[in-house]
Image (cartoon, grey):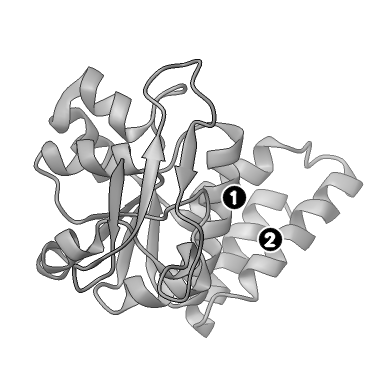
Amino acid sequence: IIPIHREAGSVIAFGARALQPDQQPKYLNSRETAIYSKARTLYGLHLSKSSIRNTGYAVLVEGYFDLAQTVQSGLTPVVASCGTAVSEQQVRLIKRFTSKVIVSFDPDPAGDHASARSGELLLAAGLQVNIAVLTEGEDPDTFIRKHGADGYKEKLRSSQKYLEYLLDREVAKRDLTRGDHQREFLARMLRVAARIPDAVGRDQFADRLAHKAGI
C-alpha cells in the first residue's frame, strides 16, 4: 500500500500494487475525489521538488516502484505520472520546477506510445524533452536492480532528444520509398511540428523532416 501525497506533503490517496503474479488486479488506486485527481498529481513530487530545482531537470517514470527504486539508488529528481501518459495538468506542474524532462517509461508498446504522447505535450509547453530507452523487458525498477544505479544514470546521460526519438520511431514503421508511406509520415510529423512553440525550432525540425523523407 503506497500513500500518495500532494505537492505540499499531505496524503490525499493511496495506491496498491500486487506482489504476486497471480494477484489481481495488479494495481488498485483510491477513487478520484475533490482533492485527488490522478491527472493533477505527480507521485513523489513532495520529495523531489527541491532536487529537481537544484539539478535543473526531472526524470519522469511511470510507477510507484520505479520511483522508489530510482530514489533509493541516489537519483532524487524523479516523479511518476501515476499512469501511462502524462496529462496537461501534470505538464504545467512540472514546468513550475524545471525546463527539462527526461522521460523514462517502459520499453514496451504501451510505454513507447506513452513516451511519444507525453513528449509531445511536454514539447508543446516549451520544455526540453529527452527520451531514455531501456533494455527491452526492463523498467527503471528492474533495470536498476540488474544493472545498478550507474547503469541507469548512463541511460539517462545517453537519452535521445524527443524529436529525434520520434523521427526514428515513425521512420521505422514505414517504407519511405513508397509515396503513401511518405505522405503518412509527413502528415504525422507535421502535426507534431505545429506544436513546437518557437519558429526556429520548427524550421530546424522541417530540415530534419525533409532529410528523413528524402524530399
Give the quarter of the figure containing the N terminus.
Answer: top left
- Give me the residue at 14% from left, 46% from top: 75
Q: Position of residue 200 (x, y in %)?
A: 49, 80
The one nearer the camera, 87 or 107, is 87
Q: Relative to 191, is 88 on the left or the right? A: left
Task: Compare marks 1 and 2 and give the one earlier in the sequence.
Answer: 1
Observer able to see residue 51: yes
From the top left corner, tell me how far across and down residue 199 is, in percent.
Answer: 53, 84
144 and 26: which one is in front?
A: 26
Number of numbered discs overlaid on the protein picture: 2
Q: Give the structural element (helix, strand or loop) at label 1.
A: helix
Name the secondary structure under disc 2.
helix
Q: Which mark is residue 130?
A: none
Camera-nearest residue between 191 and 45:
45
Quadrant in which the C terminus is drawn: bottom right
Front one among 190 and 210: 190
Residue 167, label in figure: 1
Q: Which residue sits at x=25%, y=56%?
A: 44
Residue pictured at 33% horizontal, 71% vertical: 94
Q: Mark 1 is on which residue type?
A: Leu
* The furthest residue to the right: 180
Asked if disc 1 and disc 2 are in contact, CB closer than 8 Å, the reply is yes
Q: Amino acid at mark 2?
A: Met
> What residue does disc 2 label?
189
Label 2: how many residues lie within 10 Å, few (<14), some (14-19) or many (20+)?
some
Residue 158: tell me if it is visible: no
Whether residue 146 is situated above or below residue 40 in the rendered picture: above
Q: Residues within 10 Å of mark 1 (few under 14, many from 20)?
A: some
Position of 5 with respect to 180 (left or right) is left
Residue at 55% across, 49% down: 114
Task: Measure how far apart labels 1 and 2 are at the Cα level.
Answer: 8 Å
In the image, residue 186 sits, relative to residue 108, either above or below, namely below
